Amino acid sequence: MVKTVDIQSLSLSRGERLLFQGLSLRLSAGEAVALTGANGAGKTSLLRAVAGFIRPDAGTITFSGGPDAETLDAETARREGVHLLGHLEGLKPTRTARQEFDFQTDWLGGTDAAREAAITQLALTPLLDLETRKLSAGQKRRLSLARLVAAPRALWLLDEPLAPLDERWRAVAAELMAAHLASGGMILAAVHDPLPVPARNLDLGGLA
Amino acid sequence: MRAMRVLFGRELSLAWGGGGGPLLACGFMLCLTAILPLAAGGDPRVLAPAASGASWMALALASLLSLERLFERDLEDGALDLLALGPLPLEATVAIKAVAQWLATGLPLALAAPVAALALGQPAHLIGLTALAAAIGGLGFAFTGALGAALALGAKRGGLLIAVVVLPLFIPPVVFGAGALTRAADGGDPLSALGLLSAYVLFAVVIAPVAGAAAIRNAQS
């Protein structure tokens, strides 16, 4: 179980362009951090670097946890403790929402009980038999949020999590995030609107 | 184990559902077989010696058809990120996808290959050998194809690029596979050619997951 994420003097660039350098951030159990900054400031790249998809130019990202808060193998920590919710939901258009939800949660290590709870909390029952191409953007996002609940993992990396949701579902998403933090989870979210839970702010600034 | 089963089930369902991948590949192969006599004339003295070679060429081309679906779709819709954060290393994911590709496309094509070869005038007693060689070669096509599909990730209009990357890698199995059949048709022993075919397939099975996973990591960054 991942309990802290420690980012030390991280530098990231995309192609020739340096996004930021010397970024340090420590995230402990129960904490949320809201990443802000102009378009192109590197919010998504930072999330993808924490998820292990982008190799940093310099600096380290370490995960620690377990009974003695020892440093964990980064690859294992990511495979067992990290959810990434990006702009793309990873849904196949011709498969039903149920098929995709079952696959994603099985793959990410979900349990039947957590799955039932997620379906109830996000009121997915009427959507599950539809092909995912028939879902609206907000409905797809609800399906993805359900994945976070159904397969419990400590660190949620969220990229504009609330953007496609309406008023009612933003409130539900806020409850889910609060519950995740209360159970010792962590949230690192790229946002333009404030996060609906108490969060530290990290501003990546504008375009360099 | 559970994760392997889950991913395997998804891959098979994606390959079979939505567009009938295996039927499409078999139909394509039989169309190619039908075109050859129209192009080269219907004389059995011309067609019969080329039957094994032509059926293997059709097999190789038909194996290309659904490769674009293998990783490109998952990259486009974001599912590849999800797969990378799952419990299995990417190497295993590539291998499972390739095996599912073989089951969904390679084996149906191995059943259609004797039909194509027979139609072109191959001796009837070679039916079993044709299907066997096509099944072994299909496994090689699936793994080398998966490698090519991973290498072409992220390129726009990657489908054509996959064909250009992969077809040269398909040459050795075509040589060995068609060679086994030609030799058997001449009354010789096809085992040495089958052995070389199997060796190439094993090589692909070992190399493709490692190289493919590296290519995917590169495309994701």
Image: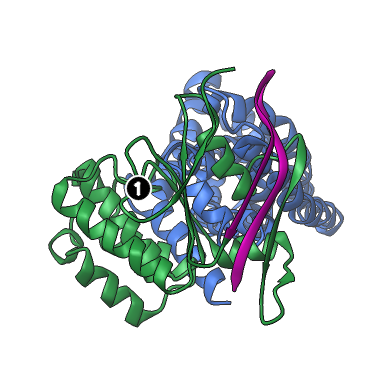
Corner quadrant of residue B192? bottom right
Q: Which chain is green?
A: A
Question: What element does badge 1 sit on?
Answer: loop
Dot 1 surroundings within 10 Å: few (below 14), some, or many (20 or more)?
many
- Judge by depth and name the residue closer to the eye, A30 or A107: A30
Quick check: B117 above or below B8? above
- On the rendered image, what quadrant is the N terminus of chain A found in? bottom right
- Residue B92 position, x and y percent, is 66, 61
Give the colour scheme shown.
Answer: by chain
Query: What residue do we see at 22% from left, 68% from top?
Result: A121
- Judge by depth and name the residue closer to the eye, B59 or A135: A135
Question: Which amino acid type corresponds to the residue marked 1 in the rendered image?
Answer: Leu
What's the magenta region?
A: A1-27
Q: Which residue is mark 1?
A: A195
Query: What residue do we see at 58% from left, 77% from top?
Result: B1
- Residue B125 position, x and y percent, is 63, 58
Question: Is most of the magenta stretch helix, strand or loop?
Answer: strand
Q: Which chain is blue?
A: B
Q: Magenta segment: does it hold A2? A: yes
